Image (spheres, helix red, strand yellow):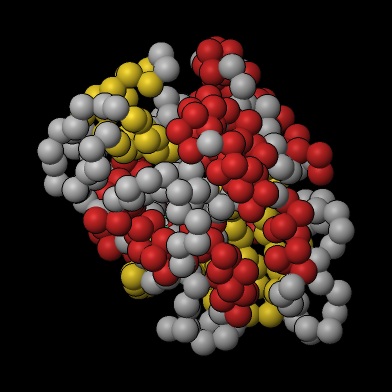
Amino acid sequence: MPIVSVTLGDRQVSGRTPADPPNCMLIVIDRQADGHLPRSFWVCDCPLTPMTAPSASVVADNARVDSEPADESVRAVRNFFDALGAAEWDRLVESPSARVALELHRRFLRRFVQPGWRVLEVGAGPGRFTVELARASTSVVVSDISGVQLELNRARVAEAGCEHAVHDRRVLDIRDLSAFADGAFDCVLAYGGPISYAFEEAGKAFAECVRVTRPGGIVLASVMSSIGNLRYYLPGVAEEIKVFGAEAMDAVVHTGDLRPTQAGGHICRIFRWREIAEMISAQPCRLLAASASNAISLGDPSALERLAADPQLWPRLLDWEEELAQEPGMLDGGTHILFAVEKVRHPSSPTAESHPSHGK
Ligand SMILES: C[S@@+](CC[C@H](N)C(=O)[O-])C[C@H]1O[C@@H](n2cnc3c(N)ncnc32)[C@H](O)[C@@H]1O
C-alpha cells in the first residue's frame, strides 16, 4: 500500500514512512524497474504523510546501524517480507533479466535434484521453486521465516496444482533447523538469499543446511553478490553515499553487510565468491558447481527486451547465459551467486574443489 510518492533521480517512487517518523526522513521501498529485489532509500527533507507501518523495526533516527545483532536484523527481515507479501511472487517474472535469473536457478535445480528425493526448502517465499520441486517429482518440506510468505506459498502452489508434493510447511529460521535430524533430507534448497539474511551468522545457516542433508545429498543455494550488486545498483549506491557518507559505503564494500546503508529497508549481506568458497570449505562438503545470476543480461534493458521478444534468440540467450555465468571470472558479476555442494560421505575425504566446473 503506497503511502507517499517522491521523485528520486529521474524516477517517481512510492513508499511508506516509518511508524513514528523523525522530522525529515522518509523510507521508500522501491522495486527496481526490472523486478530485482527492492532497495530502500532514505530521502531527506521530504514531506511526511502519517501512516501505520507494517514493521516497527524500520525506524532509525539516523542512517547508521553499526552493530545491530543478527537476531534483531533477522526479525526486521521477517517483517520486511511479511510486508512485501505478494509482490515477492512477481520478482522473477517482471522483466527479461529477472526471467533469465529464474531460468538459471531452475536449470541448476533440474540438474541436481532427482525424482523421489525428500527436499527441505528454506526461505521458500511464495513458491516459484516449490512448484519446480513438485514438477521434479520430489517431496518437499516448505519453510520460511515469514508466516505471510508461507501462506502465499500455500495459495500459489495450490493454484499451480502442485500441493500434492508438499509434505509439510513450517515457519523456520535457516540458522536453526533443529526441528530436523542430521541427514534427514536428500537435498536442501536455499534459493534467493536466506543465507544472505543471516548476516554474521551466514556460516551457521549454511552449516545447518549441510547438517540436515544426508551424506551424498545436495545443498543448492543462492546468495546476493557483492560486486555484481554494487555495479548493478550503482545509481542507488550514489544516492546512498550522499545520505550516509562514503565511510558507510566503505563498510558495505569491505564487509558486505548492507545494514549501514539500508537501515530499516532491504537489509542483507552480499558476498564475494571467495567468501562462499571459504564457507563451503569449512563444512563436510565439496563444491559441484557455481554460477553467477545473471551474466550478460544485466546491462541495457531495452537491448535485452528486443532479444527476449525474438522467439529464436531467447532460448539461445538463455543457453549463453548458462554457459557464461559459470565461467570462474564471472562468478562475482551477477546480482546473485548460485552454488551446489555435495555432502561428503566420509568427512575425511577432500572438501571444496578449487574449480567449480565439476558436476556439469
Ligand atoms: C528473496 S525471497 C526468495 C524466495 C524464494 N526462495 C525464491 O528464490 O524465489 C527470500 C525469502 O527468504 C526468507 N527468509 C529471510 N530470512 C530468513 C531466515 N533467517 N530463515 C528462513 N527464511 C528467511 C524470506 O522471508 C523470503 O521469503
Write the residue at 81% across / 39% down: 329
Where on the picture, by quarter, is residue 17?
A: top left
Write the residue at 23% across / 37% down: 23
Q: Please tell me which residue lies in front, 217 or 348.
A: 348
Residue 243 image offset from top left, x and y in percent: 45, 33
Residue 12 image offset from top left, x and y in percent: 32, 19
Residue 99 image offset from top left, x and y in percent: 50, 33
Q: Please tell me which residue lies in front, 277 or 350.
A: 277
Residue 289 image offset from top left, x and y in percent: 74, 54
When the figure is inspected, residue 287 is found, relative to residue 185, above or below; the finding is: above
Asked whether, in this view, residue 132 is left or right of residue 27, the answer is right
Which quadrant does the N terminus fall into? top left
Q: Is residue 351 visible?
A: yes
Task: Count the labels in the image.
Answer: 0
Q: Is residue 92 visible?
A: no
Q: Which quarter of the frame holds ligand 1?
A: bottom left
Write the residue at 85% across / 54% down: 355
When the figure is inspected, residue 264 is found, relative to residue 94, above or below; the finding is: below
Write the residue at 42% across / 25% down: 33
When the figure is inspected, residue 198 is found, relative to residue 63, above or below; the finding is: below
Asked whether, in this view, residue 317 is left or right of residue 311, the answer is right
Q: Please tell me which residue lies in front, 280 or 55.
A: 55
Residue that protrudes farthest toward the bottom in the picture:
181
When the figure is inspected, residue 200 is found, relative to residue 249, above or below; the finding is: below
